[in-house]
Amino acid sequence: MRLPIVRSGIVRFGLLALLLALVVAGVALLALRSASPDGDVEILLPPPTPVQPVVVYITGAVGREGLYSMREGDRASDAIELAGGLVGDADRARVNGASLLRDGDHIHVPRLAEPAVVTPPGSTPAALVNLNTATQKALEALPEIGPVTAKAILDYRAKIRRFTSVEQLLDVKGIGAVTLARLRPLVEAR
């Protein structure tokens, strides 16, 4: 008995479709195995969150004073090294190279001849002058600050609304790096 031509054409078509499906599945399997030779699945993770730089200001007895961008976890000694290291007359005993850096820190490396702010035994340390609340009279009591510079500090404070760091004194007319170095242990910006 002969099968009708129509029926044998369907069978041939079905066999051909099955064969084609097997070939496609084999190619896909080979492609997957070649993408991952060990058969492991690769997991893509999101990129790490970028670390914000820690910017510090270095002055005093270093090779190059200025602003330096550091990494979180760096220490003062790392920043000093980046600034050209200590110069010959640096007073190494007054610098804590092991301190961890925070954004906005100021590292001042005093020179041997630079006077230290010392509190006599048995006395309490003098209160720091807060740049955000100080009066004209309180500012004039600071070394290197006369009536004109005290007024300039007050005018600058009114312009910026509040000091966020002692280093902003450098933006006040009449205050330079030397004056700032003398004022630093006596003032604060809180």
Image: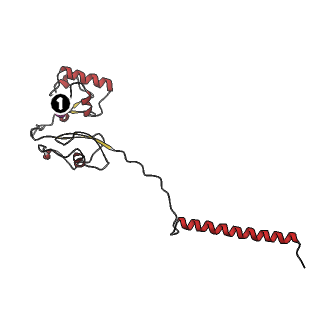
Prevalent SS, magenta region: helix
Quadrant into which the N terminus falls: bottom right
**Residue 147 % position (x, y):** 18, 20
The amino acid type of the residue labelled 1 equals: Thr
Q: Which residue is mark 1?
A: 179
Q: Is residue 127 visible?
A: no
**Residue 163 % position (x, y):** 29, 30
Against 147, residue 92 (above or below) is below
Residue depicted at x 87% and y 69%: 6
Against 40, residue 127 (above or below) is above
Quadrant into which the C terminus falls: top left
Residue depicted at x 50% and y 60%: 43
Against 93, residue 171 (above or below) is above
Identify the element where label 1 is drawn.
helix
Determine whether, in the image, residue 138 is placed left or right of residue 103.
Answer: left
Residue count near mark 1 (Cα–Cα under 10 Å), binned few <14, some 14–19, many ≥20: some
Give the quarter of the image for residue 8: bottom right
Q: Is residue 176 magenta?
A: yes
Q: Which residues are magenta?
A: 175-181
Determine whether, in the image, residue 43 is placed left or right of residue 99.
Answer: right
